[in-house]
Image (tube, helix red, strand yellow):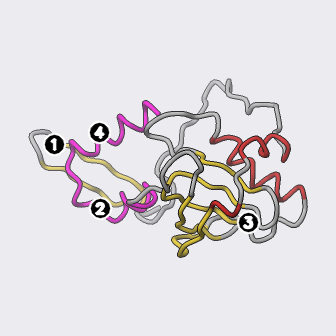
Amino acid sequence: MKYQEVRCLTSFNISVSFPAETDDYAEIIDEEDTYTMPSKSYGIDEARDYEIQRERIELGRCIGEGQFGDVHQGIYMSPENPALAVAIKTCKNCTSDSVREKFLQEALTMRQFDHPHIVKLIGVITENPVWIIMELCTLGELRSFLQVRKYSLDLASLILYAYQLSTA
């Protein structure tokens, strides 16, 4: 495998090597084999607890593509709060309950987290076309942000990002 080396020249001399052409940043290996996936499987009924009326969503331009479909920028017009910029994940082939459940599993996982460094779930639309509505990251995905700026970010920023990720 081809590796490229990055050197950060500050008061420290740090050298980091990583695969040159990879989509993966890190792998955490459970050497003691102690981690197990949660056994409870959530379904469509649990997702309905976070249901949003489609009329409250204004679907905007496509900003990306995911495993199940496109990701759009949009606006959520909440009855209680001012309009909120959101990201809307769409599901192209959510015609069967099994595909819809797999798609909505991400939302059901997201609802478990409430942290300033984790994207927040705003809600879901469980009827076709099925959507997951989440907080919009104005600078895009973290992976893309880091890849584009990998040679221009200073060490202090990288350490701050690592700290924020580790506390999330």
> x, y (%) of residue 131?
70, 60
- Could you tell me how far apart the alpha carbons at marks 1 and 2 are, in whole angstroms? 20 Å
Give the quadrant of residue 34.
top right
Choose the circle earlier in sequence order: 3 or 2.
3
| Distance from the alpha carbon under mark 3 to that under mark 1 | 47 Å
Q: On the image, numbered disc 3 is attached to which residue?
A: 91
Q: Which residue is mark 4?
A: 160
Residue at the disc numbered 2 = 149
Are the two marked residues, 1 and 2, in contact with CB atoms closer than 8 angstroms? no
At 70% from the left and 52% from the top, the residue drawn is 52
Q: For the magenta stretch, what is the residue range? A: 139-168
Q: Residue at x 90, y 62 (%)?
A: 96
Circle 4: is it few (<14), some (14-19), or many (20+) Cα within 10 Å? Answer: few
Which amino acid lies under the numbered mark 1 shown in the image of this protein? Answer: Asn
- Kind of residue indicated by mark 3: Cys
- Secondary structure type for disc 2: loop
- Between tags 3 and 4, which lies in front? 3
Q: Residue at image x 28%, y 45%?
A: 158
